Image: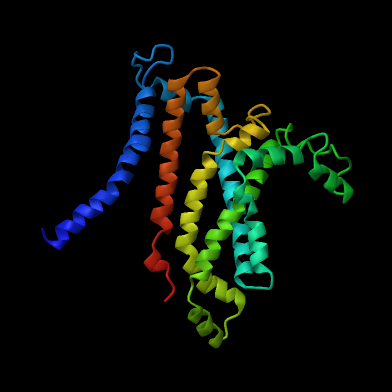
Amino acid sequence: MDMSSRDQKLSFLFFLPAFVFMILFFVYPMLLLIKDSFFDDDDPSKFIGVQHYTKALTSDTFHQSLTNTIEYVIGAVAIELLLGMILALLLSTGFKGANIIRTLLLSPLMISPLVCGLIWKFMLNDQFGILNVILYKIGLIKSPQSILWLSDTKYALISCMIADVWLTTPFMMLILLAGIQGIPESLYEAARIDGANKFQNFLHITLPSLKPVIVVAVIIRIIDAAKSFDIIWVMTQGGPSGSSSLVSTLIYKSVARYNQEGYASAMAVIFMIILLAICSFFFKQFWNPNKNAVR
């Protein structure tokens, strides 16, 4: 047996566990999900075609949850990217105490989404929430009950978004910081010789070099934010009046409360297709490490 054949067999042996894992825990459940979406909820053996898909696509409730999900994802990911970039740039300067600050900033990553939801539910409580007390003390609101963060349809989704941003901005910061530290210092030295200022360095060196990193981080966060459940469920359960309901919470309610497994499966398939389309768009439009690399 030659060396090439042995290497191929060894590579296959290393790949086999991951392949089996994907088949058992990703491909098989996904096929079951698609199959269930074509069968009746009351009689799982009865094939009903695309009725569940038609129901979902014409449902105002699904449309509202889908709109909320899009707003939630765009708002949370955009703010996390902006804050993560600012924090990463500050930490990359290596100021005194940067390591301590970085450790403190990463502490939310040690908290589960469920606990994060409980913390912010307490902080945004309509009656004794500390955030309203602080806003009242500094004179931004007239009374500690001026803003009903969790029970007002205008603020419920924003409240959940605040909790999500607090929890996952450190992840974005960490990814961007690693990318910044991987940029060759010689590029900045050459720019300084040419008389470039810090903003020009960021615009023409840092940002182009970080583009592949940003694309990966944004895609990960889009997928993660789109399937958010714990924070939403703990803080508002999708209320009031569905104002903070996401597709994930709607699917859960359809299964847990109404035993609509087929209908829930159809909504999940539709949502999965939308996510795949968005991720494919990002990869096609922005992912080109060789092109974006600064030489």
Residue sitting at x 60%, y 55%: 170
- At which x and y percent is residue 143? 88, 40
Can residue 60 be seen?
no
Q: In this view, does 196 lie above or below 142?
A: below
Q: In this view, does 246 lie to the left or right of 290?
A: right
- At which x and y percent is residue 81? 58, 56
Q: In this view, does 37 lie above or below 199?
A: above
Can residue 90 be seen?
yes
- At which x and y percent is residue 279? 43, 48
Q: Nearer the viewer, residue 128 or 96?
A: 96
Residue 118: quarter of image: top right
Residue 17: quarter of image: top left
Residue sitting at x 42%, y 67%: 292
- At which x and y percent is residue 117? 66, 39
The outermost residue toward the top is: 43
Residue sitting at x 39%, y 11%: 43
Residue sitting at x 39%, y 62%: 288
